[in-house]
């Protein structure tokens, strides 16, 4: 397969990228910035965000700004949405990138396990809150590990089950893809021009395994990524492809290699669970209950 690096020019287009102070989010912002995009870096730490912003092309021209957003905290999500809506400027593309992997057990204020709260639920509330401003698309960043997901809507806090961090991560990434497809279905039914798509980065060298709380697992993740992973910018290309190319709603993009670990952007495979429309609808309703957010 031919290498894909010809990102279309993006002048006049505005992107919000969550978790953009490092890893895939920062590389996504850098690529988009190099093509003339205006960027809002939505970061939990504004100091880290400002330092990252200075490395994004276009920062010196006033095309890159930083706003605080902790997607694991719905009060932070609401404050971010309120600020964006008060400003009233359109957003062409929302990239739901922020995420955690393999972290110790914890729950959000809503009683939801933190992988689920960070990787999925906060982005659900963010997306629906920003929907009146969106003009083009939402990009959900998922993972190959969505295939291991087995969501229990009656035990989102992992109170009845023995906690397993990587299983919780898989659940959160499956939830993201179920949301992507259900959102796109609802947008089409409403006649909206906005589309919902997704991407995953395959094996990409980032710092996402640095918060496991286990020194051995963190070291294995760090050195393993250095040995077998693509550079972060290569993984970010899948997100950028989904965010900029003329793909239909419901598209899922990942590396083209046989195992989808390495390669250039291409159609990716979703597990059969992602096509469970009953589960998608039930997840949507449960998410509305937890966030108080629905399509306006």
Image (tube, rainbow, N blue to C red):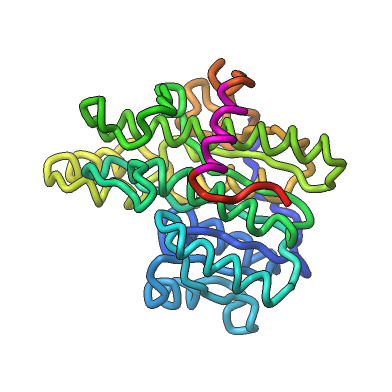
For the residue pair 43 and 86, the one nearer the viewer reads as: 86
Quadrant of the image containing the N terminus: top right
Q: Main secondary structure of the magenta part?
A: helix
Report which quarter residue 170 is drawn in: top left
285 part of magenta stretch: yes
For the residue pair 113 and 254, the one nearer the viewer reads as: 113
In the image, the segment drawn in magenta is 279-289
For the residue pair 210 and 175, the one nearer the viewer reads as: 175
Q: Where does the image place residue 194, in percent across and percent down from the top left?
A: 78, 48
Q: Residue at x 61, y 20 (%)?
A: 278
Q: Residue furthest top?
A: 272
Report which quarter residue 249 is drawn in: top right
Q: Where does the image place residue 174, in percent across and percent down from the top left?
A: 49, 30
Q: Residue at x 27, y 40 (%)?
A: 102
For the residue pair 114 and 236, the one nearer the viewer reads as: 114
Q: Residue at x 38, y 39 (%)?
A: 229
225 part of magenta stretch: no
Q: Where does the image place residue 176, in percent across and percent down from the top left?
A: 53, 37
Instruction: Determine whether, in the image, residue 243 is placed left or right of residue 175.
Output: right
Residue 81 sits above or below residue 97 on the image: below
Q: Residue at x 65, y 35 (%)?
A: 2
Q: Residue furthest right?
A: 191
Q: Where does the image place residue 128, in percent across and percent down from the top left?
A: 64, 51
Report which quarter residue 197 is drawn in: top right
Instruction: Determine whether, in the image, residue 6 is placed left or right of residue 113.
Output: right
Residue 180 sits above or below residue 231 on the image: above
């Amino acid at each position: 397969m031919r290498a894909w690096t010809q990102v279309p020019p993006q002048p006049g287009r505005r992107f919000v990228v969550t978790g953009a102070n490092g890893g895939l989010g920062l590389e996504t912002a850098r690529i988009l910035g190099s093509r003339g995009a205006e960027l809002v870096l939505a970061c939990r730490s504004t100091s880290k965000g400002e330092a990252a912003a200075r490395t994004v092309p276009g920062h010196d021209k006033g095309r890159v700004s930083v706003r605080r957003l902790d997607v694991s905290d719905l009060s932070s999500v609401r404050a971010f949405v309120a600020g964006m809506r008060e400003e009233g400027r359109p957003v062409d593309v929302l990239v739901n990138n922020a995420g955690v992997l393999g972290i110790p057990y914890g729950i959000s204020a809503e009683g939801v396990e933190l992988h689920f709260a960070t990787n999925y639920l906060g982005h659900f509330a963010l997306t629906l809150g920003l929907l009146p401003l969106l003009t083009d698309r939402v990009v959900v960043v998922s993972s190959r590990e969505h295939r291991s997901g087995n969501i229990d809507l009656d035990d989102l806090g992992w109170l009845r089950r023995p906690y397993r961090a990587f299983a919780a991560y898989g659940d959160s990434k499956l939830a993201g893809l179920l949301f992507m497809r259900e959102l796109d279905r609802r947008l089409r039914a409403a006649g909206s021009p906005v589309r919902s798509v997704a991407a995953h980065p395959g094996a990409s060298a980032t710092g996402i395994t640095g918060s496991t709380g286990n020194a051995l697992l963190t070291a294995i993740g760090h050195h393993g990524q250095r040995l077998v992973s693509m550079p972060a910018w290569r993984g970010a290309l899948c997100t950028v492809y989904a965010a900029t190319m003329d793909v239909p709603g419901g598209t899922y993009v990942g590396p083209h290699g046989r195992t989808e670990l390495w390669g250039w952007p291409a159609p990716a495979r979703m597990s059969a669970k992602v096509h469970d429309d009953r589960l998608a609808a039930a997840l949507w309703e449960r998410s509305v209950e937890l966030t108080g957010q629905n399509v306006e």
